[in-house]
Image (cartoon, helix red, strand yellow):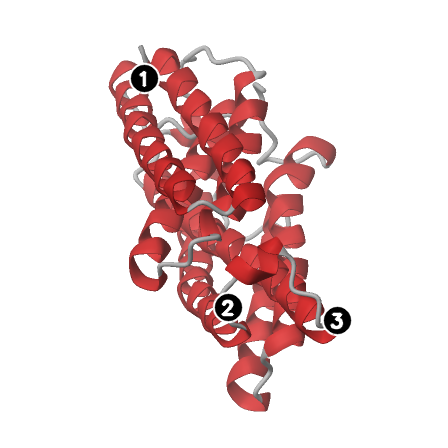
Amino acid sequence: MNIYFFKISTLLYFLATMVYSVYLILLKDDLLRWASRTVLLGFVIHTLAFLSRYVEAGYTPVTNLHESLSFFAWMIIGVLLIAGLRYRIKMLGSFLTPIALILMLFALALPKEILPLAPVLRSFWHPFHVIFAFLGNAFFTLAFCCGVMYLIQEHQLKSKRMGAIGKRLPSLKVLDDLNYYSLKFGFPLLTLGIITGAVWAEYAWGRYWGWDPKETWSLITWFLYAALLHQRLTVGWRGRKAALMAILGFIAVLFTFLGVNLLLPGLHAYSNW
């Protein structure tokens, strides 16, 4: 049943992405409303997919690459809905929904069987670690999209040629504020993800930190975002510099999430894709 819900939610995210794409061309607000409603319905059904898989598996279903990609996409759409309630940026879904869709399509191509839980994953700390880590990454995805939108808007303002997208993008100040809002929530969540992961490692392997590739790159990512927040708060970094750093940080997030697991051998590598 969970795969059935998963496929329906993927289809809905695909339809929403298509409607957002048409909206960017025609700029009709009715299309935007339909896209937003489709995303919301997709999120509800995606939630059912996650809950049904939890019931079927008997544990938090974030243990392999298929489940992790799906969970990351679910978190991204959740953050999109939260940010949309506060900032009401019309274009936000046009940037975030395709990212979630790409993750879902990759997950769709991977093995989906529910396997017995590995002993190392049978831990009280497992759900806390994955929730903090993925929610933090979802906020960093939002910061990345804000950075991309900021650069697009800045370029169009400087060139004095406002295209269709630029006319629908919010002001540079709003994008910069949302970038900071995303970092303000994402960084503490990443910190909690690392801390709970360290406590879990002590229970599983008898040490808090072992410089496993995943641990090392998580720390590198943490330092990147710590530097960005420090520069924002003390030096007053805003605008283009902050946007570029948010994009760089997201690249580190992706490498930590996927590159390390698939390319570098270690204790965190997915045993089943």
* Quarter of the figure with residue 21: top right
* Quarter of the figure with residue 149: bottom right
Element under disc 1: helix
Q: Amino acid at mark 1?
A: Ala
Which of the two labelled residues, at mark 3 and mark 1, occupies the earlier sequence position?
A: 1
Q: Residue furthest bottom?
A: 235
- Numbered circles on residues, count: 3
Classify 10 Å Cα crowding around label 2: few (below 14), some (14-19), many (20 and above).
many
Q: CA distance from mark 2 to mark 1?
A: 41 Å
* Quarter of the figure with residue 77: top left
Element under disc 2: helix
Q: Which residue is mark 3?
A: 159
Which label sits on residue 238? none
Classify 10 Å Cα crowding around label 3: few (below 14), some (14-19), many (20 and above).
few
Which is more foreground, mark 3 or mark 1? Answer: 3
Point 50% across, 42% down: residue: 23
Which label sits on residue 175? 2
Q: Amino acid at mark 2?
A: Leu
Q: Which residue is mark 1?
A: 57
Quadrant placement of the C terminus: top right
Which of the two labelled residues, at mark 2 and mark 3, occupies the earlier sequence position?
A: 3
